[in-house]
Amino acid sequence: KPLGKLLNQKGILILEFATTEDSSHEKCKKEGKHLGDGKYIYKDGTYYHFYNKDYLKKMFENFNYKIEKVIYWDEPHSVLSTYKHMHESWIVAASHSINSLF
């Protein structure tokens, strides 16, 4: 479904996307199957997608949007991340109206 249909005219869509600098990206490159365009299937069958900022700008070009990078530490939680590790993500806030974002 197109993103625009998920969002009503006064709504704000807030999403998180793993960056290509996320700690999981290197492990996926080494131990996963590369599907192209930052997409991987890890050896346990989990799908991962890592995004660069230009890709997101194109994805949200028909919206008013803000993109911010965040970095945070996470506890062990999966086969891919069995140790305390760093995540780096893009946070995107998108709206049909510029007034909704400010």
Image: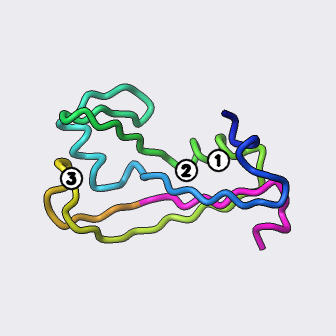
Residue depicted at 31% across the width and 28% down the height: 34
Q: Secondary structure at mark 1?
A: helix
Task: Locate residue 15 relative to residue 80 in the image: left or right.
Answer: right
Disc 1 to disc 2: CB gap under 8 Å = yes
Q: Which residues are magenta?
A: 89-102
* Residue found at x 39% / y 48%: 20
Tag in front: 2 or 3: 3
Amino acid at pointer 2: Lys
Q: Is residue 95 left or right of residue 34?
A: right
Q: Which mark, residue 78?
A: 3
Residue 27 percent location from the top left of the image: 21, 45
Q: Which mark is residue 57?
A: 1
Whether the magenta-drawn stretch holds residue 53 is answered as no
Q: Is residue 46 above or below residue 8?
A: above
* Secondary structure found at label 3: loop
Between marks 1 and 3, how big is the CA–CA gap? 30 Å
Query: In the rendered image, which quarter is residue 41 located in?
Result: top left
Q: CA distance from mark 2 to mark 3?
A: 26 Å
Task: Rate crowding at label 2 as few (under 14), some (14 to 19) or many (20 or more) other CA atoms within 10 Å.
Answer: some
Tell whether 93 sits left or right of 33: right
Alpha carbon distance from label 1 to label 2: 6 Å
Residue 15 in which image quadrant: bottom right
**Image point 17% across, 36% down: which residue?**
31
User: Residue sitting at 36 percent across and 25 percent down?
Assistant: 35
Residue 102 locus on image (x, y percent)? 78, 74
Q: Where is mark 2, residue-wise?
A: 53
